[in-house]
Structure formats: C-alpha cells, structure tokens
Amino acid sequence: MTRPAAVRTGANSFEKIASQHLDAVYRAAYALSGRADTAEDLTQATFLKALQNFGSFQMNTNAKAWLLRILRNTWIDQLRRAKTAGPRVPLDESILNSQPANGTVWSDAQDLLENFSDEVVINALTRLADEQRLTLFLVDVEGLSCEDVAEITCVAVGTVKSRTSRARAALKTCLADHARQIGWAGERI
Amino acid sequence: MNHLTDEQFEDLIAGRTAEHDCMHVTACAECRARLAEARAIAARLKQAFAGIQTPAALAEKIRLQSRAAEAAVSRRSARRVVAHCRSYAAAAAAIAALIIIVPAVIWLTTPASAVAALADIHNHNISESGAFVGETNPARLAAYFREHLGFNPRLPEPDHGLALRGCCVRYFQGDVAGSYVVATPSGIMSVVVVRQTPQRMELTDYVMPNGLACWRGSFADKNIVSVRIGEYSYCAVGAVSHDYLANLLARLID
C-alpha cells in the first residue's frame, strides 16, 4: 500500500531518495539534451513530477529506475510540445574541430576514443536517435541491467540488447566519420 | 561460421555470459575484436560522463523545492484532518438540527394538516366512495365501528332530527379514526372521531351559545367545530357556520 509523501520520513523521505540519484538523473538529462541549461530544466521538471507522484512510488523498489522513467517521459512530453521529431542538437563545431592533444593520427577505435575529448564523445552521443541515445547511456554509463532499461524505456529486454548494440555501433561510426573529416583517421575504423 | 548476435554480445559485455564459456569468441578473432571495441566504447562513454556533475545551484534548488513541497503536503494533510473534523462536526450539527427541526416542523405543520385531513374525510364521506359504508341503521353502524374501530363512538339519537347516512373508518394522522355522516336541514355534515385533542389539532377555543366549551377551525369552505368527550374529540365538519356545527355537537352530548 502506498503512503502519502508527507507520511514518509527519514530514509524514505523524498529528499533523501532524490538526492541519492540526482547525479544520475542530471547526467541522463544531459545525455538526452546535450546542453547544460536544458539538462537543468529537465532535471528540475523531473523531480517536480516525481515529487507529485511520490505517493504512488513503491518503497523498496528501484528508485533510480523510477526517476529515470519519469525523466524519459518528461523529455518525450517536452519533445511533443516542441513538435520536434527529436533533439537534433547541432554539434559544437568548435569542439569537434579541436585537435587531439598530441596531434596523433588515429588508426584504431580504441586509440581514437581515448584521444577525443569528453565533450566530443558526449556530443557524438547526442546525434543518435532518442531511444538509442538513452538506452546506450543507461546501459554503458549508468550500468543498469537490461531489465531495468526495458522497464524505463517500455520495450522488451531483447530490444534493449539489440538497441544498445546498434547504438554503440552508431556512436563509433559517428566518431569515426568525424575523425575522418578532420583528417585524424585515414581509414574507416 | 555464425558470428555472435547482438544479444550475445551484450550478454558478454554485461558479464551475464562469461567469455570463457563462449567457445565462438575464443575461436573467432573478428568477434573478439568486435567485443573489445564495444567494451572500449562503453568504457569511454562512461568516462566521458564521469565529469558531468549536477551543478550545486541546481542541487540546492531541488533540495529546497523538495522540502517546500513536502512541507506543503504536510500542511495539506493537516488541513485535510481539520477539514474532516469540521465536516464531521458539521454533519453532527446537521443531524442535531434535523432532530430538533423535523419534529418542530411536524408540530408546526400539524394544525394545518389536521384541519385539512378532517375536511378531506368529510369530502370523502359526501362523495360516498372508497371505504364509505352506506349504512343508516344506528345499531349496524355501531356494530361496524366496534369491529373496525374498536369502540362505539357516540351517535345522534333518532329523535334529534338527524338522519344517519353512513360511516367510514380511515387513518387520521397515523391513527385509525371513525366518522359518520348525518343529513341535516342545512346539508350533509360529517362527525369525525379522533384521539387527538383539539389543542393538538390547533383548533381555537370557542364557547358555544349554550356555554359549552369547544374548539373551532376552518379549511377552505369547510368549518370545523370540536368537542372533547372522554378520550376522543368529536369534530363536526361541514360547509355551514361554526354555530350550526356547535349545535349539532350539542345534540350528541345531550
């Protein structure tokens, strides 16, 4: 039986639960939007919704998954309101065009990945399709199980696996294409 | 050779399947390279986000927002408790009011209802419909009343110049009441015998010409005069004057 938020205290208070997963929600918001200011707004909207629905949250269940599902739904709502097909956030050309620290020409994926800056990697992620982006983030960055991701994204576990695999391949392609454009990699990796 | 499927790769990356348990990976260099590459991408992605932290201002804003909202919920809960108490108090007050007001309303509306009911019985009698019994023999009328009413009301004597036309037993304000009809030179009158006192029926004090105390009232074109005889009130009802009705009752008493 659920209890009103006001009745829950101590470890079960909303503030306590929310603070434990604030960074994960913010990072996910950042991964979805690709922008710090949008991520802040999205995070705030997510926690507001979560607070409003805290009465329906089942204690001793996965609070992180619950918050991330709210985040996803909030993001989708915002996209619908904006009547956009997806967050095609343009890459920051100044970031993508920045040169590797040591000027090396990269020939394999691992070296390439290691020598791109964090911003480039994250911006490459934001170029993926919405569900691919979120799925890859949840699996690779947050380390959630496929079952949890399936619940958050409302798809089957098998779909999560195939989607993760495709997203990872798409991210690699995106980075490799960019590397080739700027002359960092001479061959397709 | 069939390479690993996407799902098999994900199970290996997530550790759900141990690499040494997967014979194909051991044998296939292409899949091993693909697996290593996928792991490298996953690790790099995780590393890229490691530096992304919630801005302190946002964390503080959400913390304050949570506290404020929880406090608001607490206040709403407290208000709901108070509101419930108030609603219970209001309900109790309403019930108490009903207990007091309803009898009062009944009491206040009874007089009008009483005279109206007496007039209604008379109208019913003169139409000679329904439960009206067209019996003119005083003995048989008495027997009828005894059977249906439980007692013999006082009937006019034959030498009083009043002709009986019939009788009726009906309900009057929750009680069984008997009535009979007499034909007089001025028209048909009813005498309704009820347990209720004239005061209870809110009839007004009235002193008959012969000095006998009685009560009277009116409803529409019908006048009513009542006298108390024993445990019963005899109410004469008709479209004649109060004095005429009073004289009719005086003959009963005589």
Image (cartoon, rainbow, N blue to C red):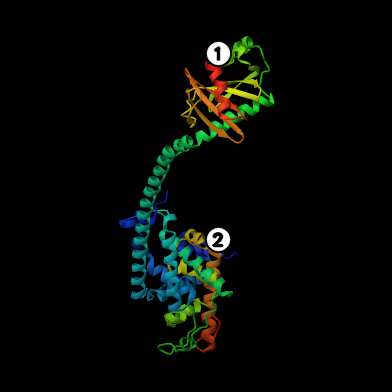
- Badge 1 is on which residue? B152
Is residue A45 visible to us here? yes
User: Dot 2: within a 10 Å radius of its alpha carbon, few (fewer than 14), some, or many (20 or more) residues?
Assistant: few
Which one is nearer the viewer's eye here, B235 or A13?
B235
Residue at image x 53%, y 32%?
B217
In percent of width and height, residue A176 lies at 53, 81
- Badge 2 is on which residue? A155
| Picture layout, residue B135 above or below residue B84 | above
Which one is nearer the viewer's eye here, B112 or A83?
B112
Task: Name the element at disc 1.
Answer: loop
In percent of width and height, residue B145 lies at 59, 14
Tag 1 subunit: B
| Picture layout, residue A38 above or below residue A161 | below
Which one is nearer the viewer's eye here, A122 or B64?
B64
In percent of width and height, residue B72 lies at 36, 61
Task: Name the element at disc 2.
Answer: loop
Please tell me how many numbered marks the rendered image carries: 2
Tag 2 subunit: A
User: Dot 1: within a 10 Å radius of its alpha carbon, few (fewer than 14), some, or many (20 or more) residues?
Assistant: some
